[in-house]
Image: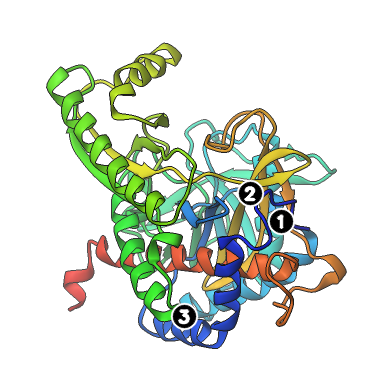
Amino acid sequence: MVPHLVTALTGPINELEQRILDTMPAIERWFRLEWMEHTPPFYTSVDVRNAGFKLAPVDTDFYPSGWNNLTPAMLPLAVQAAMVAIEKICPEARNLLIIPEDNIRNTFYLSNLVQLRRIFHMAGLHVRIGSISPEFTEATVIEVPGGETITLEPVMRTNGRIGVKDFDPCTILLNNDLHAGIPGILEDLHQQHLLPPLQASGTLRRKSTHFKCYEEISRRFGKLIGIDHWLINPQFESCHGVDLAHAQSVQRLTEGVDALLTKIRRKYKEYGIKEKPFLVIKGNNGSDGMGLMTVRDAKDLPQVLEKTAARGPLPAGMQDLILQEGILTHERMNDAVAEPVVYLMDRYVVGGFYRVHAERGIDENLSAPGSSYVPLAFGGGAQLPQLGVRPGASDPNRFYMYGVIGRLAMLAGSYELEATDPEADLDT
């Protein structure tokens, strides 16, 4: 089901939906040609915001951990995509090792591991779950809500290969973004496929690289279907070497905020948008980094910094920040603010859900304590787009539009990983 939209059915988002449906053959051919030249990330989730006048991704995760939130009807899609992905990487694959986050006390996360294990087991693989945390020195059975269990085993390294006791995998799937650093046990593996590659980790990844790639792709896509790419692209600016303890640094950040807000105001004026623009300041590193800060006017930045510091100490020393255009969300689920999250494996959309937060506003981050998740599902079991249905009236058509944006972000992820591949020069 698609939650009620507060925007009018004749609004711009429905014009975009109609344009995407009308150009579907060209879109699918364009994606097909792109995947002939580029390798998609193994699996991806994309947070999408629907402002009614604009639809854009605000975050792309290479280590998605909400697989348990997908509706069971989507499971066959994930299994088929997993088969394709594994076959491309290691056709003779028999064993898959999943490496989870270190903190596995979260029952929702454990359910995610159960679902991942189920997907790859149904794709024809023997699956074990191995922890690289020093906390685990022996196999530990953990009960998961719903009556299932998982066995968490310590990862061992022998002759440049890693595995668990009596289990030598050819493929290792990371479900851990390694934001605390890359452990040596994962480096320089011998004839084993590590997915995603280490340059995708939170330690090495930069959001600005991703959104620079996305901006390039959105321009080309906008030209393909005949739209202004701003309608699907969040504007951003990087701000390097910021020390929030020094006035000169804060002044430079203030100037960056003012410049970006000015650009956004111009677009709002061009499209007759009455909402007040805002932007989000966050750490540029691939993990959560610095806590999110929302700014609506450059002169408010000192006050915003003060409020942020009141919630916890600001990061010390030089910071690499990204200023990103804030995207409203006018989606609703039972009167609570919601945003769609699209899940992809290989080059395929395999499902999604709504992240819902009853205590957050339309301009706030919904990935926060108190959020809940509602699977995306389709009335009547229809999963393919329904041509000829008026915009805004078809669940599958709306989800197809979300899926196109998700695939654009995933393609940007592919460009990003190629650009940051430490071995890329050796292959040329």
Q: Tag on residue 163?
A: none
Quickly name the residue at label 1. Answer: 70
In the displayed image of the protein, which residue is found farthest to the left? Answer: 248
Residue identifier under label 2: 66
**Residue 74 in sight here:** yes
| Alpha carbon distance from label 3 to label 2 | 25 Å
Q: What distance separates the C-alpha of mark 2 from that of mark 1?
A: 8 Å
| Nearer-N-terminus badge (3/2) | 3
Tag 3 residue: 31
Sort mark 1 into few (<14), some (14-19) or many (20+) by Cα contacts within 10 Å.
many
- Quadrant of the snapshot with the C terminus: bottom left
Across and down, in percent, residue 230 comes to 39, 60
Q: Secondary structure at mark 3?
A: helix
Whether pointer 2 and pointer 1 mark residues with C-beta atoms closer than 8 Å, the reply is: yes
The amino acid type found where label 2 is placed reads Gly
Q: Is residue 41 visible?
A: no
Three-letter residue code for mark 1? Leu
Residue at point 62% right, 46% down?
A: 330
Question: Is 206 in front, or is 387?
Answer: 387
Q: Residue at x 59, y 59 (%)?
A: 342
Q: Are marks 3 and 1 in contact (CB under 8 Å)?
A: no
Labels 3, 2: front one = 3
**Residue 320 coordinates in the image, percent (x, y):** 24, 37
Q: Nearer the viewer, mark 3 or mark 1?
A: 3
